[in-house]
Image (tube, grey):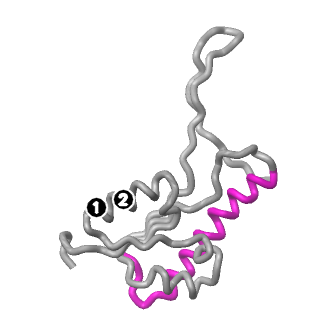
Amino acid sequence: MTNNDPKKIAISGATGFIGSHLRSKFEKDGQQVVAISRDSLYGKPESLARVISGADVVIHLAGAPIIARWTSKNRREIYDSRIQTTRNMVNAMKLLEKRPKTFICGSAVNTTLPEKSARTGNWRPIRPGILSVP
């Protein structure tokens, strides 16, 4: 396969913000894109292996939305949606005779907007979001 040959790219989270843009770009470039369903991600690794079989690249972006109240239940769902699905993805790839050449995994993007201090009037810097699971 040369760099100009079409590649098969499997994407979880293909309907999300980043995944949908990647999918559109890859399809425009003539790549074969397979959207990995949520059912496949949470199912048995054997079923997921059939979905990603033959993929040159697997991009794993799926996960529960982080735009929610940070309750213990939501934090657990966010955590599990990344750990369990990544574990299933890795176990599925282990079952493949020909494994993907590239595996990219991204769990979330989050920033906290700067805010003006009521006390000093100064702007506070952007702070990264922190996922904490009890």
Please provide percent x and percent y for residue 124.
Answer: 60, 21
Tell me where residue 45 sits by quadrant: bottom right
Residue located beneath label 1 in the image? 28
Which residue is at 71% across, 46% downward?
68
Work out whether 130 lies above or below 125: below
Q: Nearer the viewer, residue 131 or 65?
A: 65
Q: Which residues are magenta?
A: 72-101
Is residue 95 in the magenta section? yes
Is residue 33 in the magenta section? no
Q: Amino acid at mark 1?
A: Lys
Tell me where residue 130 sits by quadrant: top right
Classed neighbour count for the residue bearing mark 2: other residues with Cα under 10 Å, few (<14), some (14–19), many (≥20)? few
Residue sitting farthest toward the top: 120
Q: Amino acid at mark 2?
A: Ser
Q: Secondary structure at mark 2?
A: helix
Residue sitting farthest toward the bottom: 97
Residue located beneath label 2 in the image? 24
Distance from the alpha carbon under mark 2 to that under mark 1: 6 Å
Which residue is at 21% across, 79% downward?
1
Which residue is at 61% across, 21% downward?
115
